Structure formats: structure tokens, C-alpha cells
Image (cartoon, grey):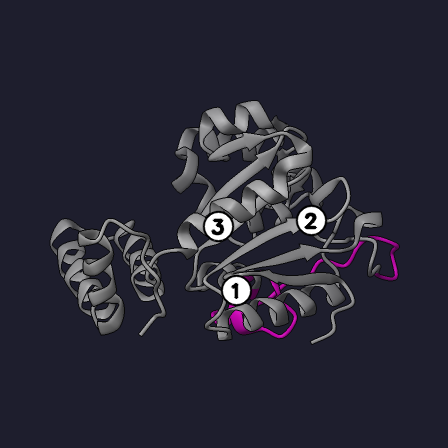
């Protein structure tokens, strides 16, 4: 389908979703939110897509919410606030749905961080399964600078990636983290030269997309679930994941044949 605020393409079994508001460092407005939700849904529903690369156009990955998009009578930016126990379902609260969109995506999600990732843009990067960064990649939590506390999943994802103390450091100081430090603390899985970022990210995604798709999706779900589980529950969930993966009977046979015949497997998800 046509999009106005993102670009979407496919390379073999890898889809590439590019945030495309470079003049605003890909800051999140209503049009971008709508297009991102639609494009992620397109990748989710397409069995030909086995991994998704998420990146930004221009010199920024995503500068967070576009606070210039709406202002109140006092001239200050309007920040959506959801109330009550059903806050995640409030029609004015997009931040919860934004976090769930990426966390619930059941295929590998690779963040290709080409520049600054700030605020909700950093949260989006953190929601990816893995992140590959250009030399120009930079992270900044931003929220306290805007008189806000973290949202869009940052308080959940960040301490699970870097640990509580480092998360507290980044959130409470709002300091910038360059690519080298981000790699050292685990915000990035690898760093590549700027001009090679997208090709390297697609190749990285291709390493995942080459395997049986049902097994990959099951593996992702087991990892996500068991990050919060005790050992007994984790073992039970692993068994359930194995059962789900083995429903792809043809891929099960192909994996055995590829191993015994010392060749690359050709998997169909069936």
C-alpha cells in the first residue's frame, strides 16, 4: 500500500521499513504513527517476510515525538495523557500501543540506527530484538528534559538491556551516548561505517531469515517470555515452543536432510 511518512521495500525475505521525515529527524507525528502501524502490519501478515529492518532516512533514526505538531492555548506542546486503569486503550494514548506494536511483532526485528535515537525514538530502537548502529548512531533518553518520565516502553526495555544502574544513569542524566559507548554497554550489537549500515543490517537480518521461519518465531517468543519466568515455567514454555516449531513438518525434514547432505537448507515455513 502507498505510504506518506515511511518507505517500505522487500529484499528477498527481508522487509525494510524506513521512517521518512528526514527534515524533522523522523520525529513521530500522527502520519508517521499511522504509516508505521500499517507497514509493520503488512510485514506481519506477509509470510514471505521473515525479518524486518527498521531504520531512518537522512541523518537521524528518530528524534522522538514531534512536539511541534500540536500546541495548546498556552503555546506549550500538547502531550497526550491517558487516565485510569485502561490507559493503554485510551484513544489519545499512542505510547502504549507504540511499544506493543514492536514488542508483539513475531518475527526478528532489527534496528538499523543511522543517527540520533531520542525519547520515543530510542524506545522504538530498544524494542527491536537486536540493533546494528552506524558510526553516527547516538542515543538520548530526553524525557526528563521535557518534564516527563519515560514512556513508550523505555522503562521496561532499557534496564533489561543494560541493567538498572546504567538505565538510571541514562534516564536521570539524559546524557547522550555515542556508538562506541552504546556498543560497550549493549545498546548496540555491532557498529559499522555509516555508508554500509543498511546493507549490513539487511545481511544481518538475512542470517536470521535463512532458517525455518516457524522455529525462528517460536524461538523469539520463548526468549521474550522466559526473560520474566522462573526456571520451571521457562522449561515448560521451551517445550511448548518446541512443539510449535515442529508443526512445520516439511522444514523439520529439510533441516535433517540439509545437515546430513552438508548443504544449505531451503525452508518454507510448512
Residue 90 lies in magenta, yes or no?
yes
Front residue of 20 and 123: 20
Main secondary-structure element of the magenta-colored stretch: loop
Contact, CB < 8 Å: mark 2 with mark 1? no
Magenta stretch in the rendered image: 72-97
The residue to which callout 3 is attached is 205
Residue at the spot 19% in from the left edge and 63% down from the top edge: 242
Residue at left 48%, top 70%?
Answer: 48
Is residue 120 found left or right of 44 in the rendered image?
right
Task: Report x, y in % for residue 78.
Answer: 77, 59
Residue 179, x across and y down, in percent: 59, 28
- The residue shown at (56%, 23%) is 180
In this rendering, position of residue 253 left or right of residue 139: left
Q: CA distance from mark 2 to mark 3?
A: 16 Å
Which comes sooner in the sequence, label 1 or label 3? 1
Q: Residue at image x 85%, y 48%? A: 23
Residue 219 visible in the displayed image? yes
**Distance from the alpha carbon under mark 2 to that under mark 1:** 17 Å
Residue 3: image x %, image y %? Answer: 74, 69
Which numbered dot is residue 56? Answer: 2
The numbered disc on residue 101 is: 1
Q: Is residue 168 magenta?
A: no
Amino acid at each position: 500500500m502507498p505510504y506518506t511518512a515511511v518507505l517500505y521495500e522487500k529484499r528477498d525475505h527481508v522487509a525494510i521499513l524506513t521512517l521518512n521525515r528526514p527534515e524533522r529527524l523522523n520525529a513521530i507525528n500522527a502520519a508517521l504513527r499511522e504509516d508505521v502501524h500499517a507497514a509493520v502490519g503488512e510485514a506481519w501478515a506477509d509470510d514471505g517476510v521473515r525479518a524486518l529492518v527498521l531504520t531512518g532516512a537522512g541523518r537521524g533514526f528518530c528524534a522522538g515525538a514531534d512536539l511541534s505538531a500540536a500546541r495548546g492555548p498556552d503555546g506549550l506542546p500538547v502531550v497526550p495523557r491517558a487516565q485510569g486503569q485502561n490507559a493503554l486503550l485510551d484513544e489519545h494514548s499512542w505510547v502504549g500501543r507504540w511499544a506493543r506494536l514492536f514488542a508483539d511483532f513475531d518475527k526478528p526485528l532489527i534496528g538499523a540506527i543511522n543517527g540520533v535515537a531520542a525519547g520515543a525514538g530510542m524506545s522504538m530502537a530498544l524494542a527491536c530484538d537486536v540493533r546494528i548502529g552506524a558510526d553516527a548512531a547516538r542515543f538520548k533518553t530526553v524525557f526528563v528534559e521535557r518534564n516527563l518520565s519515560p514512556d513508550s516502553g523505555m522503562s521496561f526495555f532499557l534496564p533489561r538491556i543494560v541493567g538498572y544502574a546504567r538505565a538510571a544513569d541514562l534516564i536521570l542524566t539524559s546524557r547522550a551516548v555515542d556508538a562506541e559507548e552504546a556498543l560497550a554497554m549493549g545498546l548496540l550489537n555491532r557498529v559499522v561505517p555509516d555508508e554500509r549500515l543498511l546493507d549490513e543490517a539487511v545481511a544481518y537480518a538475512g542470517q536470521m531469515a535463512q532458517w525455518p521461519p516457524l522455529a525462528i518465531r517460536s524461538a523469539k517468543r520463548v526468549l521474550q517470555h522466559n526473560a520474566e519466568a522462573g526456571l520451571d515455567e521457562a522449561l515448560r514454555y521451551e517445550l511448548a515452543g518446541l512443539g510449535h516449531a515442529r508443526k512445520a513438518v516439511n522444514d523439520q525434514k529439510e533441516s535433517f536432510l540439509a545437515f546430513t547432505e552438508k548443504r544449505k537448507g531451503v525452508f518454507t515455513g510448512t
